[in-house]
Image (cartoon, rainbow, N blue to C red):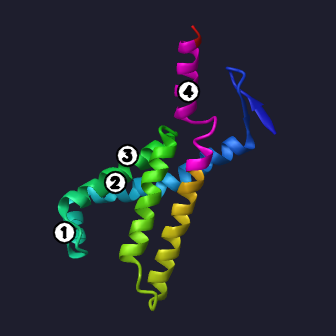
Amino acid sequence: MEFETENAVLVNLADMALLFGRLLLSLLFLEEGIELASNFDGALEAMAKLGVAAPIATATILLQLSAGLAIAIGLMTRLAAFGLGLFCLLTATLFHTNFASHNELLHFEKDLAIAGGMFVLIVAGGGKLSADMVVRRHWKTRLVA
């Protein structure tokens, strides 16, 4: 099933699925980034207990917010997905390795699954319903003109 938009660009179910998938993936990072930023001192204190220095903790919050937003709107989707995919791999391997705990194993596996989703976005890109596509069309028309 395809739908025609104002600019006669066909949008199909795959593009709508990419949009929905991007929104679902970004929700986790935006919510967590907002939570950490709104309680910044507490977040730094909690991360310090895990051995994470303040500059790294701050960069983590900025990554979650900026890359989460980028993926939601589909701007620089591949780069944002790469950053968050690596972040998830690092989080899994650094903080969720006590496999004797079923909860830790579950967090490890969820981080790997989210990283997998991010790596799929690297390949697929943002789709037609993304800011990437708007930027691409803008530059294409400027180069032709």
Query: Which residue is label 1 attached to?
Result: 45
Query: Which residue is label 4 attached to?
Result: 136
- Mark nearer the N terminus (1 vs 3): 1
- Mark nearer the N terminus (2 vs 3): 2
- Mark nearer the N terminus (2 vs 1): 2
- Span colored in magenta: 122-143
Query: Which residue is label 2 attached to?
Result: 34
Q: CA distance from mark 1 to mark 3?
A: 22 Å
Q: CA distance from mark 2 to mark 3?
A: 11 Å
Q: Residue at x 45, y 92 (%)?
A: 100
Crowdedness of circle 2 by 10 Å Cα count: few (<14), some, many (20+)? some
Q: Amino acid at mark 1?
A: Glu
Q: CA distance from mark 4 to mark 1?
A: 42 Å
Query: Is residue 72 shown above or below 64?
Result: above
Q: Foreground residue, 74 or 139? A: 139
Q: Amino acid at mark 3?
A: Ser
Q: Foreground residue, 106 or 86? A: 86
Crowdedness of circle 3 by 10 Å Cα count: few (<14), some, many (20+)? some
